[in-house]
Amino acid sequence: MKEVVVLSGKGGTGKTSIIGSVAVLSRKRVLADCDVDAADLHLLLDPSIEEKHEFRSGQVAVIDKDKCTQCGLCQELCRFDAIKDYTVDPISCEGCGFCSHICPADAIVMEECKAGDWFVSSTKHGPLVHARLGIAEENSGKLVALVRQQAKEIAKKKELNYIISDGPPGIGCPVISSLSGASLALIVTEPTLSGIHDLERVLGVCKHFGVPAIVCINKYDLNEENTASIREYCQKNGVDVAAMIPFDNEVTEAMVRGMTVVEHSDGRVAKEIKSLWQKIEQKLQG
């Protein structure tokens, strides 16, 4: 079983569009959407939800009105002003638990709260594990780890060859959670100055965790000077530029029809993505 995670230094580089096409081209795979803060792979693959589970993480203080003596100590000492009129505001509460320790009547308990949901779905391109983090909720790295674990269990159970993960953008905790232990990272970048900078940061994270990486330059022909700079940087650092995808309206046309670009046409973009998947397979086998 090999796991490929698709990353980008920032949002909007075309990562999800590419992974949707890779899902069509690959065989015997399970898909995982690890971008739980802004999951959108399901919009492209139109999944049918088979399982829905709650994701519980973090704690919030709850005051037992029957035990509370209204001494006011919790309201006085809460640094987040989360307790007013002896009622806890769950949005303001940081779950530190301090109030539960200092309450003389033991009237405050810490309860685990629901932070989101995770799903196991079926698509025409194979099983998909995805999730939805609640508004303003944290611990997305923990939810990413859960999504990956479920994808691995499905791959083992169904004897699938690949786990293909749509990773979150950036270099934060969710990225680390989606990257660690992966077989290969595909980094999607674009020919802008910020794209070059973000690529350097993501490659640094991959190097730190010992995950081999290849690069795909999306919409490379919008600024060929910056594209040349990216290729030069990758060459100096021993990173393979596996694909250079041109800008083409066929990608937008495919999305409007709810399709991936390789399903919609056999144009320049589709051909380059097909070549990219062949190189990914070669890397994994090698």
Image (spheres, helix red, strand yellow):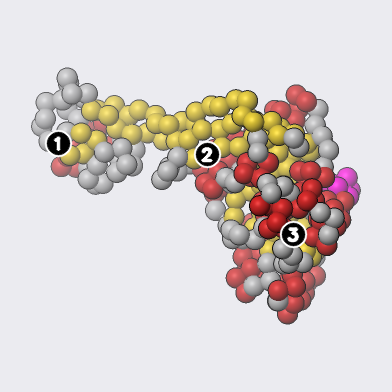
Note whether 147 is above or below 273 in the view shown.
above
Residue 65 picture quarter? top left
Closer-to-camera residue (9/236): 9
Closer-to-camera residue (257/37): 257
Note whether 6 is above or below 236 in the view shown.
above
Q: Amino acid at mark 3?
A: Glu
Residue 213 picture quarter? bottom right
Q: Specify few, some or many for label 3: CA neighbours under 10 Å numbering under 14, 14-19, or 20 or more.
A: some
Q: Viewer-nearest of labels 3 and 2?
A: 3
Q: Which residue is mark 3?
A: 250
Magenta range: 279-286
How far apart marks 3 and 1 lie (CA) works out to 58 Å
How far apart marks 1 and 2 lie (CA) works out to 33 Å
Is residue 285 on the magenta stretch?
yes
Q: Position of residue 217 (x, y in %)?
A: 74, 65
Q: Specify few, some or many for label 1: CA neighbours under 10 Å numbering under 14, 14-19, or 20 or more.
A: few
Q: Earlier in the sequence, mark 3 or mark 1?
A: 1
SS category of the residue bearing label 3 = helix
Q: Position of residue 148 (x, y in %)?
A: 64, 37
Q: Earlier in the sequence, mark 3 or mark 2?
A: 2
Q: Which residue is mark 2?
A: 132
SS category of the residue bearing label 1 = loop
Note whether 271 is above or below 56 in the view shown.
below
Is residue 242 on the magenta stretch?
no
Q: Is residue 79 left or right of residue 94?
A: left
Q: Amino acid at mark 2?
A: Arg
Q: Which residue is mark 1?
A: 85
User: Which secondary structure class fits the magenta region best?
Assistant: helix
Q: Quadrant of the N terminus?
A: top right
Q: Position of residue 175 (x, y in %)?
A: 60, 50
Q: Position of residue 259 (x, y in %)?
A: 72, 47
